[in-house]
Amino acid sequence: MIDLKILRESPDLVRASQRTRGEDPGLVDALLDADSARRAAIVDADRLRSEQKALGKQVGKAQGEEKTALLAQGKELAEQVKAAVARQSAADEAATEAHRAISNLVQDGAPAGGEDDYVVLDHVGTPPEIADPKDHLELGESLGLLDMERGAKVSGSRFYFLTGQGALLQLGLLNMAAQKAVANGFTLMIPPVLVRPEIMGGTGFLGAHADEIYHLEDDDLYLVGTSEVPLAGYHSDEIIDLADGPKRYAGWSSCFRREAGSYGKDTRGIIRVHQFDKVEGFIYCKPEDAASEHQKLLAWEKEMLAAIDVPYRVIDVAGGDLGSSAARKFDCEAWVPTQNTYRELTSTSNCTTFQARRLSIRYRDEHGKPQVAATLNGTLATTRWIVAILENHQQPDGSVILPPELARFVGTDHLTPK
């Protein structure tokens, strides 16, 4: 949730953020009204409780008819208090709902617009010249790395088996990401992939994109689409120690997405699937450190992409494509030869204090006063990377030569047709 102090002092700033996202600025006025009504209800309830307390003292000292009259007055006042508390509760619920309806404040400098309004910040590497390139599915099947047909037979469309060296390729890729993360000061975590509703909602994933998430109704648990979710919940309702700097975690997990509304898009191969594995970086820090930590996450993603040696570009994602929790997001998109375009491999988001405020994650400032922490996340490796690796490193004979750093983790530098 956004900081109510900013809303009260600078509502035009919040309205501008809403417009940058392509969302309704009228929600700002709805929250202002709900916040005002909540504060008025609190004042009213507190006033009546104070009167009730004072009357109770008078009753203790009174006698006879005076006491009888005061008791009758007390009974009436008790009903008024009860009604005021009910109004306060309703006003609080309405204000919370209005508060949660507003997305995070877009950071200055982020472009306005939707999915196609990103700004390209950098190009790294040159797309290879490949005559008649094979796509990753054809390569994966001929090399014995991938079996989509049996994945569909067992689980339905958009499921797959990684087989033989395909499984080793993914494990090597993720292990390389884990080792690099640890070397850069991250604590490696293997988190649960089922989370409670308050954790999923706290990270902002139960809003506009709730239909992307698998929900187990009998247990009221959600399957995560990224380990960002359990890692964000790891310190929920805690005051964490940031005196020695940010806390950095790298979560290795399977991830699940329904891909609702994407039918007909990227249905071939493993670009857009229901289950995949990922190593995700997650950071807790002081709000003033969030922007610099965001740049560090982007640099660590670039370090990983250098290790798989694929051409890529970095984009500054537009406000309408940020997702509700992010204030700024940078994506790294790798060149895919058979599509003659760039496709997302990594995404790193600065969520400022939005998630931590929902999940009640705080730290103590230099005066010992609790303050809301900031959170950030970023992809360090995932199954989709196999698409870019296979297509960019394919050879005329149908084999794939892996870059040296990745090959060390896979156990071979040459994938040959079976």
Image: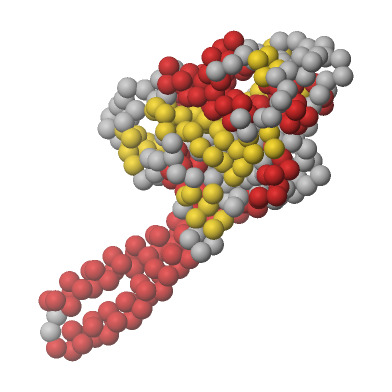
- Residue at image position (59%, 10%) is 404
In the current view of this chain or complex, which residue is farthest to the front?
418
Above-or-below relation of 128 to 370: above
Toward which corner of the image does residue 341 lie, by quadrant? top right
Residue drawn at (63%, 33%), measured in percent from left and top? 163
Query: Residue at the location (42% across, 29% down)?
Result: 188
As rendered, which of 264 and 115 lies closer to the eye? Answer: 264
- Render colour scheme: secondary structure
* Residue at 70% from the left image edge and 49% from the top image edge: 153
| Image spot of residue 200 (x, y percent) | 51, 48
Query: Picture coordinates of residue 14 (x, y %)?
Result: 60, 40
Horizontal relation, residue 361 to residue 222: left or right: left
**Camera-side residue of 50 and 211:** 211
Relative vertical location of residue 243 with respect to residue 74 in this rendering, above or below: above
Left of 331 or right of it: where is 139? right
* Residue 399 lies in quadrant: top right
Disc tally is: 0
In this rendering, the answer to whether 386 lies above or below 27 is above
Locate residue 237, reporting x and y percent: 36, 45
State the residue lying farthest toward the right: 132
Give how far across and how far down residue 370 sits, in percent.
33, 37
- Which quadrant: the C terminus? top right
- Report whether residue 143 is seen: yes
Asked if residue 209 shows in the view, the reply is no
